Amino acid sequence: MNTPGAERVSSGPHSVRLSGIRSRLSGPLVTIAAVSFVVGIVSGGVSYADRSPHREAHVAGTTAGWPHLVLFVLAVVLTVVVLRRRTCSHDLLLLAPLGSRAAQRFRRTLLSAGRHPTAALRLLIGIVPTAMLVYGAWRIGDQILGGLDPNFTVNAWGGPSYLGAMACHYLDGALIMAASAGLLNLLLLPAEEPGPVELNLG
């Protein structure tokens, strides 16, 4: 028998909010991202297990600290601008590439490719940003365990420390994935038919 307290917890605003977010995510897209991330963790673990016992020497000038500081400032500015211009909630904006609307737009573009050459061209161009999104999820997972190898980070951007390398590479990954998602947003057809008016695919 459920207690009144348990009912209040399960029906609270946080539960409703999480349920709403889950309902707006695409199962196949989330699965692809999750599989890529897990494969990255496994490949990073294999890389760490096969690490060399010989430590590589740190080479001065390989940290790229200042360029990444500029990229960080740029990322903060762009994030503020995008969030101020979007009407949707911040969490849904971050999850947009995994959303059901994104899946609908991809499906509609795919189904239109056989009838409209421009739709096929959109898909062809979209291969690269799509691959970058999948690669980004893999890379995030790969560095979790692979970065534990001192040779993995000694001459990496943000190295030689593990946390420094993680911060720089995750910043790069976030920017690349954001740019890829933005390009796909421009390429994919709208999720719904505009009505009786013929769709302009040009």
Image: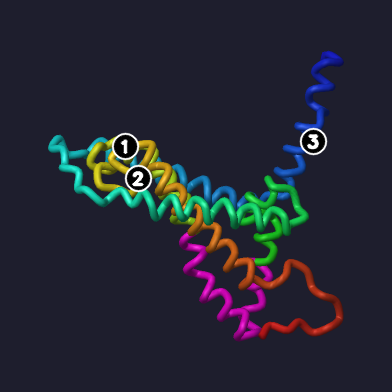
Query: In terms of secondary structure, where does tag 2 sit?
Result: loop
Q: Which residues are magenta?
A: 106-132
Label whose residue precedes the other's in the sequence (3 or 2): 3
Residue name at image x 73 percent, y 67 percent: 191
Q: How far apart are the two marked residues, 3 and 2, measured between alpha carbons?
A: 40 Å
Mark 1 burial class by Cα count in 10 Å: few <14, some 14-19, many 20+: some
- Determine whether, in the image, residue 37 is placed left or right of residue 43: right
Q: Which mark is residue 158?
A: 2
The figure's colour scheme reads rainbow
Q: In the image, residue 176 lies at what x, y percent?
A: 48, 59
* Vertical relation: 120 (above or below) 68: below
Judging by the rendered image, the residue that carries numbered circle 1 is 161
Judging by the rendered image, the residue that carries numbered circle 3 is 16
Q: In this view of the protein, which residue sits in the foreground, 149 or 6?
A: 149
* Vertical relation: 140 (above or below) 124: above
* Vertical relation: 158 (above or below) 191: above
Prevailing SS of the magenta stretch: helix
Q: In the image, residue 167 lies at what x, y percent?
A: 43, 43
Q: In the image, residue 130 lies at what x, y percent?
A: 51, 63
Verify CB contact (< 8 Å) between mark 3 and mark 2. Answer: no
Q: In this view of the protein, which residue sits in the foreground, 32 or 87?
A: 87
Residue name at image x 49 percent, y 47 percent: 35
Q: In the image, residue 114 lies at what x, y percent?
A: 62, 81
- Determine whether, in the image, residue 134 is placed left or right of residue 24: left
